[in-house]
Image (tube, rainbow, N blue to C red):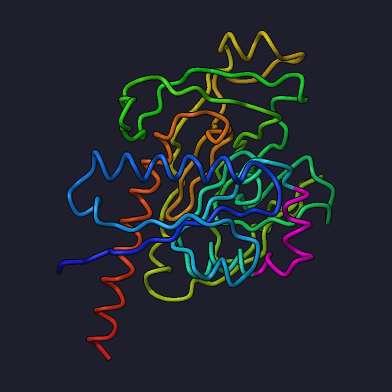
């Protein structure tokens, strides 16, 4: 079956944080896809919008939750009537969603170092995150890492190291078993909040829930840049800094604070795949009915 994807809209949640920087990199990524991608990709009309309302969210085929203050973002989302639409987007519709730093916290099913009731989560990733794992603002650092999932851009190869910027960043502390409902075991943990349960909206969304958490990138704890800027030791040999599960991607660092669009190129490719799957599903569903 041939799928034609003429128009794709990607939103960046613009309640707080580095949302405009993501929009700029999305535009650069779309240009790279048009120049270096398959001929069909050059015909796609991309729209990148800042999302502040449920109506704007409803227009989106994919969504980015930017870095910022996760508590502030969740509070503004709740007060502006955006929290439940966001949960529906991620967990009911199962549309492609990517969270960076604070966005990773919001997309986790469990987050620790948090007062009960002090942080609302969206969920979507069966992980527990450790908030502010790398310490205070003054302990921020950068590290050049090899990321296996990068896409090519006009001026950078996927094989070149990626400059990862960590600012009060979380890490994935634990990969959790998938639960159809709430992560009840996590609810009993001290200073830990969990996301509410949401049932997938249809069979295609249901398939996304069967995906396992995939570790996309780790940071060795002996990384010189990390050791030089930390006032405390980190247990273990590496920290998990990027994970993917079905339609959801979460990373600890801030790609939007660089000029490197390679992660955005890769992710836009994943959005296109998801849009094509949705179109195929709807065609088959209409035929069956």
Q: Is residue 206 magenta?
A: no
What residue lies at 36% left-to-right and 41% top-to-bottom?
A: 266
- Decide if residue 263 is on the left or right side of residue 229: left
Q: As drawn, is 70 to the left or to the right of 57?
A: right
Residue 33 position (above or below residue 179): above
Expressed as whole percent of the image width and height from the top left, the position of residue 218 reads 50, 27
Image spot of residue 127 (x, y percent):
58, 46
103 and 187: which is toward the camera: 103
What main secondary structure does the magenta stretch of the protein show? helix
- Corner quadrant of residue 198: bottom right
In this picture, residue 24 sits left or right of residue 172: left
Say how many tags the image has: 0
Which one is nearer the viewer's eye here, 81 or 148? 81
Estimate the x, y position of residue 284 in percent, counting from the top left: 24, 79
Residue farthest left in this picture: 1
Q: Which residue is at a point 62% across and 53% down the rendered structure image?
A: 109
Q: Position of residue 204 (x, y in %)?
A: 37, 70
Q: In the picture, which quadrant includes the C terminus?
A: bottom left
Over which residues does the magenta segment extend?
71-84
Instruction: Quadrant for residue 280, please give it.
Output: bottom left
Question: Residue drawn at (38%, 65%), measured in percent from left and top?
Answer: 207
Residue occupying image coordinates x 30% and y 31%: 154
- The relative height of residue 37 versus residue 220 in the rendered view (above or below) is below
Quarter of the image with the N terminus is: bottom left
Front residue of 114/136: it is: 136
In the rendered structure, does residue 74 fall within the stretch colored magenta?
Answer: yes
């Amino acid at each position: 079956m041939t799928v034609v994807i003429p128009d794709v809209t990607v939103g960046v949640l613009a309640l707080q944080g580095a949302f405009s920087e993501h929009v700029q990199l999305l535009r650069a990524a779309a240009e790279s896809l048009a120049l270096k991608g398959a001929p069909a990709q050059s015909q796609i009309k991309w729209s990148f919008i800042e999302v502040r309302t449920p109506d704007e969210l409803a227009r989106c085929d994919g969504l980015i939750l930017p870095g910022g203050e996760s508590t502030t973002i969740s509070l503004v989302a709740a007060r502006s009537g955006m929290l439940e639409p966001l949960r529906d987007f991620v967990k009911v519709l199962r549309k492609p969603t990517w969270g960076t730093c604070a966005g990773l916290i919001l997309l986790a099913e469990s987050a620790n170092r948090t007062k009960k009731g002090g942080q609302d989560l969206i969920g979507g990733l069966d992980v527990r995150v450790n908030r502010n794992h790398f310490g205070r603002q003054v302990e921020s650092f950068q590290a050049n890492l090899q990321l296996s999932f990068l896409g090519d851009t006009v001026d950078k190869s996927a094989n070149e190291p990626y400059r990862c910027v960590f600012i009060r960043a979380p890490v994935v502390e634990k990969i959790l078993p998938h639960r159809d409902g709430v992560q009840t075991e996590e609810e009993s943990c001290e200073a830990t909040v969990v996301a509410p349960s949401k049932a997938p909206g249809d069979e295609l969304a249901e398939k996304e829930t069967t995906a396992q958490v995939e570790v996309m990138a780790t940071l060795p704890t002996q990384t010189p840049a990390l050791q030089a800027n930390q006032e405390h030791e980190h247990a273990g040999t590496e920290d998990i800094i990027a994970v993917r599960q079905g339609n959801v991607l979460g990373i600890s660092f801030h790609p939007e604070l660089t000029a490197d669009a390679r992660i955005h190129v890769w992710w836009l490719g994943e959005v296109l795949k998801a849009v094509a799957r949705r179109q195929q599903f709807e065609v088959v569903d209409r035929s069956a009915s």
